[in-house]
Image (cartoon, rainbow, N blue to C red):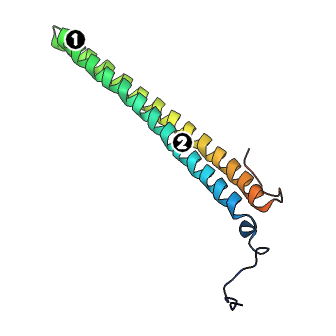
């Protein structure tokens, strides 16, 4: 019989050791959720940048259509106002997405704790 390590923990003291397969599957789900959340943010950002590039191209077209200097200033002024507004709106969207991701992660982490321990005592965010 092999000697016991001074650092060995019985499975009862660390519930994760009681069912390591469930622990690793739950951990994989949490990692997949984090990856999906990152992709969701990237999709939103790329969609916004596509829109901004289209607006930049429109600016160039509008500037070349103007015949007077004052018209060019009007076009540029409107472009800058819309750009500032759209960036503020996008920042708000990203904050909302991030907040939702955080709440969902907290809920899933609580469910994972329940799954690992089987006691149903985890507190979760609503």
Residue 117: x and y in percent read 78, 62
Instruction: Give the SS element for disc 2.
Output: helix
Return the residue found at the far front.
1
Q: Nearer the viewer, residue 50 or 33?
A: 33
Q: Quadrant of the C terminus?
A: top right
Q: Nearer the viewer, residue 8 or 119?
A: 8
Say left or right for 54 vs 16.
Answer: left
Q: Nearer the viewer, residue 3 or 98?
A: 3
Which residue is denoted by mark 1 in the rendering? 71
Q: Quadrant of the N terminus?
A: bottom right
* Crowding near the residue tagged with mark 2, few <14, some 14–19, many ≥20 C-alpha atoms within 10 Å: few
The answer to which quarter of the image holds residue 42 is top left
The answer to which quarter of the image holds residue 19 is bottom right
- 1 vs 2, front mark: 2
Q: How many marks?
A: 2
Say left or right for 99 vs 74.
Answer: right
Say left or right for 99 vs 83.
Answer: right
Residue at 79% over, 74% down: 12
Which residue is denoted by mark 2 in the rendering? 36
Q: CA distance from mark 1 to mark 2?
A: 46 Å
Residue 21: x and y in percent read 68, 60
* Placement of 68 over or under 30, stated as above or below: above
* Crowding near the residue tagged with mark 1, few <14, some 14–19, many ≥20 C-alpha atoms within 10 Å: some
Tell which circle, 1 or 2, labels the residue nearer the N-terminal end.
Answer: 2
Residue at 67% over, 88% down: 5
Residue 14: x and y in percent read 74, 72
* Placement of 72 over or under 15, stated as above or below: above
* Placement of 3 over or under 31, stated as above or below: below
Instruction: Give the SS element for disc 1.
Output: helix
Residue at 56% over, 38% down: 97
């Amino acid at each position: 019989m092999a000697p016991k390590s001074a650092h060995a923990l019985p499975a009862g003291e660390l519930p994760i050791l009681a069912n390591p397969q469930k622990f690793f599957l739950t951990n994989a789900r949490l990692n997949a959720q984090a990856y999906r959340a990152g992709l969701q943010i990237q999709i939103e950002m790329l969609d916004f940048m596509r829109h901004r590039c289209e607006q930049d191209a429109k600016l160039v077209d509008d500037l070349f259509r103007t015949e007077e200097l004052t018209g060019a200033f009007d076009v540029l002024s409107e472009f800058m106002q819309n750009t500032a507004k759209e960036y503020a709106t996008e920042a708000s969207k990203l904050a909302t997405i991030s907040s939702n991701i955080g709440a969902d992660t907290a809920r899933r982490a609580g469910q994972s704790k329940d799954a690992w321990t089987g006691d149903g005592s985890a507190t979760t965010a609503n």
